[in-house]
Amino acid sequence: LKLSFVAKSRTESKELRPATIRSTVQEFKEATADAAQQLEQLGFCFWRQGVSMDCCQRLARYVDEALLAAEAEVAAADQETRYARHRTYFRRLAHATRQDRIEFTLPMVPVVVDALKEMVASVGGLLEPFVSRSGRLVDLSCMISDPGCEFQPLHADTSMERVKFTVFVALQDVTKEMGPTFLCPETHNFESHAALDV
């Protein structure tokens, strides 16, 4: 499982609007069954309120503070250790040609763990038939984009060698100007992935 908390804009700090809450066990079961069918057929699904608004807002504040601290630590490092310090916190996006969109590695601090627990409690039942309880988390990060950043070219986030899912959790409402993620239906197959490599 690759988990990315996304849509954190450095200058555009908006709060999430409340989502529809599934209030009964039956509504939850129906939503899970619908999402599982969509996931199998299309290769993706949308799940509202996988992480509570309060938790997203706490995590967004943490990311803002941690990002500033990480950038300051990297800037203060001497020439010999700067690259290693940078790699501790940031990963270069495979498809980025500029530095206006970054992937910020998240540590397992309490606010991040809280978000993980909420997400697993919410979508764990949906993903379990596909990955089983022995599935593991292989990536945990926050995507951060600057205003006016370039769009990434169409690409796959996962390979076809193993069953792997990417879960995106928006920490704020997403606008077109923020560079939202586009999803391509029914491309979770070898032919579509091979076509991207051409």
Image (cartoon, rainbow, N blue to C red):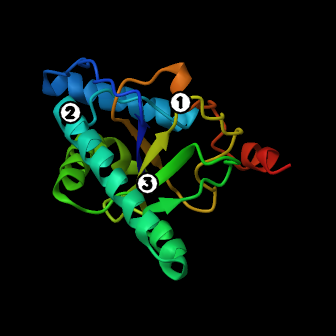
User: Which numbered tag is attached to residue 104?
Assistant: 3
Say which residue appears at 28% left-offset and 24% top-offset. 15
Residue 166 in percent (x, y) is at 47, 47
Identify the secondary structure beneath mark 1: loop
Is residue 75 something one can see in this rendering?
yes
Label 2 belongs to which residue?
Answer: 52
In front of the other: label 3 or label 2? 3
Residue 1 versus residue 167 in the image, above or below: below
Q: Secondary structure at mark 3?
A: strand
Quarter of image, res 32: top left
Mark 3 in CB contact with mark 2 (< 8 angstroms): no
| Circle 1 residue | 147
Q: Disc 1 or 3, which lies upstream in sequence? A: 3
CA separation in Å, label 1 and label 3: 17 Å
Q: CA distance from mark 3 to mark 2?
A: 21 Å
Q: Is residue 83 above or below residue 72?
A: below
Instruction: Determine whether, in the image, residue 70 is placed left or right of residue 162.
Output: left
Q: Amino acid at mark 1?
A: Pro
What type is the residue that disc 3 sits on?
Phe
